Amino acid sequence: MKPNKLGRIFIAGALAMGLIACSDSGDKKGQKAAVEAAAEFSLLDQVPADAPYVIVGSRPMPLGLSEKMTKAAATDIDNGELRKMLAAVREEDDVSEDLVKLGDVVLSEFEGKMNAEGFKSMGLSINGRRLLYGLGILPVIWLEIEDPVKVEALLSRIEKKSGMKAEKLTSGEMNYRRFVLGDDLIAVLGVNKKWVVFAMLPAKSEKELLPLAFGETRPDKSLQDTGSFKKFIEKHKFLGYGDGYIDLVRLAEMALGESEGVNAQVLRALGTTPRDMSPACRNFMKTTVQSVPLISFGFTEATDSKYVIKGAVETSPAVAAWLKKMAAPVPGVGMDSDAMFSFGIGMDLPQVRDGLKAMIRSFMENSRDCELVDKKELTQAMQGMDMMLNPMIAGIKGFEISVNNLELDPQTMSPKAVDAQLVLASVDPKGMFGMLGMFSPQIAKIDVPEDGTPVQLPIGTMAPMAPPAYAAIKGEVLALKLGEKSPTGIDKLLKTPVAEVPPLLAVSYNPEKMFNAIAPGLKDMIASMQGEDADDLRSAYDSLETAAAVYKYAEFRMMGTDRGMEFESTVVLK
């Protein structure tokens, strides 16, 4: 089974159950509404305050954006492609026949219904509120529905077609199906007037935990009691459409056998015992996780045609300060781009080296008597950093490669025309260019002035079919321009501004430009191939075509901020 197939099955399956969401507005009004919604979301009253992970969608999502996103990811469900992939799983992998059959039946129910009306016909809501949290390490999921009768009918059809029989029971206002998953686990799938609920529970604690999972009893202290989730939304300026966190401190407590309440009860019922380790190792684990206590994520902006998701590995102030120092400003990296594809990195390599060495020294000090840490390997790693980040490359701040346009020969898939560029920031750009002479005697003879004057490179003598290429240097910037239009625009490259918050890494992508460039060649390749290779290439073609039809622009950035290592993903829809 190919990894890309598994990924597409997972994404589509998650969409089918309503676990992927979008939002509407990132202004102050939207953030205020999100805080109010979190304060009023009654389901938070049943989430233990020490739940190790929580994702909350306390506001209904804008219908238009939800439909667009569902459409973008649902092509393989609507056209039956995922069912074909699932059939291949049965033939290729050692997977339960019953599980494959169940997946096929579920997919068949959603075929042609990946839209608002289709969801409504099954009693589901394409933009309903939702909740996912950890009852200990086990998940509980609540999804808002429109018609419980239709949902029950859907579940009955799936049960009948798959041949899987479940015990049908009632608990309070919840009608539910009970599934036995081995000796230690059970799963329940319940439906009441407003919600469908899925939970996994330890068989030994089913009686005590089922009412809690179904909201019939309350934990001793809930997120509603503490108001902590409302404060979390307010602090991060999230919009309330599937925002949440993973509490690494709580997970560490469970791993060490030091958790309390429901978290400890679940582990005991599952028969989980913590690994035996010395006090020194326990202290080392606690100290380490305290420096990286939380992973947070959520929507910070959204309109009918755009959304922004921010996530962060939140760290201690000391670690955050180091991460901020790691970034180096590089012209163009992290700036809005109209390129087909761009990839950029900006890092202060001496800061990276010194920070990593300091971190390793801290590990060695904190784990002095811990038997689980190999001090020799840490010492060798620290020595290796000096070798890798040597003075020859320490002056490199970063670079950005952009492909603005590309035309391929459909027969050979070789470039017919190209417009691409490289911007490299360095304390010694002339020295960096000189390093290219190590690979080519012709380039070694070239002297590029440092006043921004472009100089043509003898690429044609090395590769006759290569397009013209020019280089220019000014200040700390080396610019290379490739294509028939070079050196036009190379002066602008040398003056490209830097981002207000320089990212460590930035990637942007224009799906329509990419598809238009490679689609003709892919079509010819598909026509000349047979069997599984042709099927895989056709699947890739369909995915690119779908992305080009739905997405206008996508960008990902990674930054060091006061919060820690922050990630920002921006998507513009057509």
Image: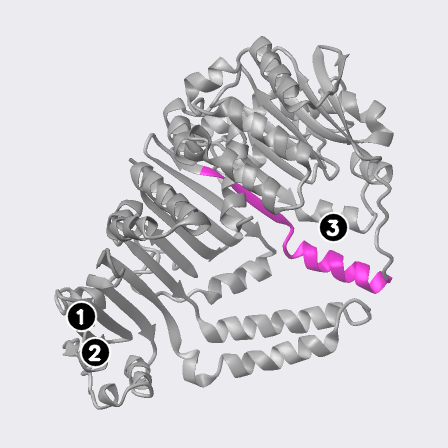
> Which numbered disc covers residue 252?
3
Residue type, numbered disc 3: Ala
Q: Position of residue 159 (x, y in %)?
A: 65, 20
The residue positioned 67% from the left and 79% from the top of the image is 379
Q: Is residue 137 above or below residue 111?
A: below
The residue positioned 68% from the left and 22% from the top of the image is 163
Describe the element under mark 2 as helix, strand or loop: helix
Q: Is residue 458 above or below residue 479?
A: below
Q: Is residue 235 visible?
A: no
Describe the element under mark 3 as helix, strand or loop: helix
The residue positioned 13% from the left and 66% from the top of the image is 484
The residue positioned 81% from the left and 51% from the top of the image is 256
Which region is colored magenta? Answer: 278-299
Q: Marks 1 and 2: CB-CB under 8 Å? A: yes
> Which numbered disc covers residue 467?
1
In the image, 161 versus 265, the foreground residue is: 161
The picture quadrant where one finds residue 348 is bottom left
Mark 1 and mark 2: span between their CA atoms?
8 Å
Residue linked to disc 2 = 459
Mark 2 and mark 3: span between their CA atoms?
56 Å
Q: Earlier in the sequence, mark 1 or mark 2?
A: 2
Q: Tell which tag, 1 or 3, sits nearer the viewer.
A: 1
The picture quadrant where one finds residue 145 is top right
Residue type, numbered disc 1: Pro
| 294 relative position to 129: left or right | right
Query: In which quadrant is the C terminus drawn?
Result: top left
Q: Earlier in the sequence, mark 2 or mark 3?
A: 3
Q: Is residue 99 magenta?
A: no
Mark 1 and mark 3: span between their CA atoms?
56 Å
